[in-house]
Image (tube, rainbow, N blue to C red):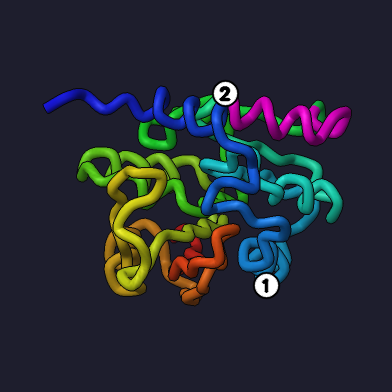
Amino acid sequence: MEHFDRKEHWEKVYQTKELKDVSWFQPTPETSLAFFKQHNIPKTAKIIDIGGGDSFLVDHLIELGYQDISVLDISASALNRAKERLGEKAHTIHWIEADAANFVPTEKYDFWHDRAAFHFLTAEQEISNYIQTAYENINSGGILVVGTFSEQGPKKCSGIAIKNYSESTITDRMSGRFEKIKCITVDHKTPFDTLQNFIFCSFKKI
């Protein structure tokens, strides 16, 4: 079987497609922002957006006054696009070029956000490693929010197979380390007028 180079794949995606030409494009990430509001995340909280790429979440967080934001993505091209868009504001953000599957944090976070990175991890070792890394690097009582394709959602994204989750399967994966707070299902409307069913769950570190 030919080795799949995940980084090379995502660099090519971000080098060849405009922001509005990718299915995950979202001018206002309302679902993600609602979790910040629901949990009353303080403006001084240490926040990380896993797989943030050139998502607009960071723009909205800056506008809301959040002061300690990290954005992680496997693609340097994605991060560079976000930096270019933000201009001078980009200097206030911690940019991390890394694969979520083997990310080694150098600090701990109060709020760990992941919209559609976790479901790209399909190997058991990668999934276990991700969850353990999150557990070890989220502060006591901190919040983990994960959004993945639901069992009614697509089976692939960007040509890559993903792992679908239900409320019970993702809760089971997190059990022992995180306690479920809330799960919701959301239909994301892509720029191509198709719907993708997501499940978003928030957890509290035990």
Image coords of residue 183 (percent x, y):
47, 74
Q: Residue 120: which disc?
A: none
The segment highlighted magenta reads 77-90
Please name the residue that numbered disc 2 is placed on: 76
Q: Quadrant of residue 129?
A: top left
In three-dimensional space, the C-alpha distance between marks 2 and 1, rounded to whole angstroms, equals 32 Å
**Magenta region includes residue 81:** yes
Residue type marked 2: Ala
Residue drawn at point x = 32 percent, y = 65 percent? 165
Q: Is residue 91 left or right of residue 76?
A: right
Are there few (<14), some (14-19), or many (20+) residues within 10 Å of tag 1? few
Image coords of residue 116 (percent x, y):
47, 52
Q: Nearer the viewer, residue 8 or 36?
A: 8
Residue drawn at point x = 52 percent, y = 47 percent? 138
Image coords of residue 46 (percent x, y):
68, 44
Q: Considering the image in quadrants, where does the N terminus appear?
A: top left
Q: Answer above or below: position of 152 versus 141.
A: below
Q: Quadrant of residue 126?
A: top left
Which of the two labelled residues, at mark 2 and mark 1, occupies the earlier sequence position?
A: 1
Q: Is residue 91 left or right of residue 38?
A: right
Q: Answer above or below: position of 127 versus 35.
A: above
Nearer to us: label 2 or label 1: 2
Please name the residue that numbered disc 1 is placed on: 38
Residue type marked 1: Gln
Residue drawn at point x = 58 percent, y = 32 percent? 107
Q: Secondary structure at mark 1?
A: helix
Mark 2 and 1 residues: CB-CB less than 8 Å, in contact?
A: no
Q: Is residue 206 left or right of residue 65?
A: left
Farthest front residue in view:
192
Are there few (<14), some (14-19), or many (20+) residues within 10 Å of tag 2? many
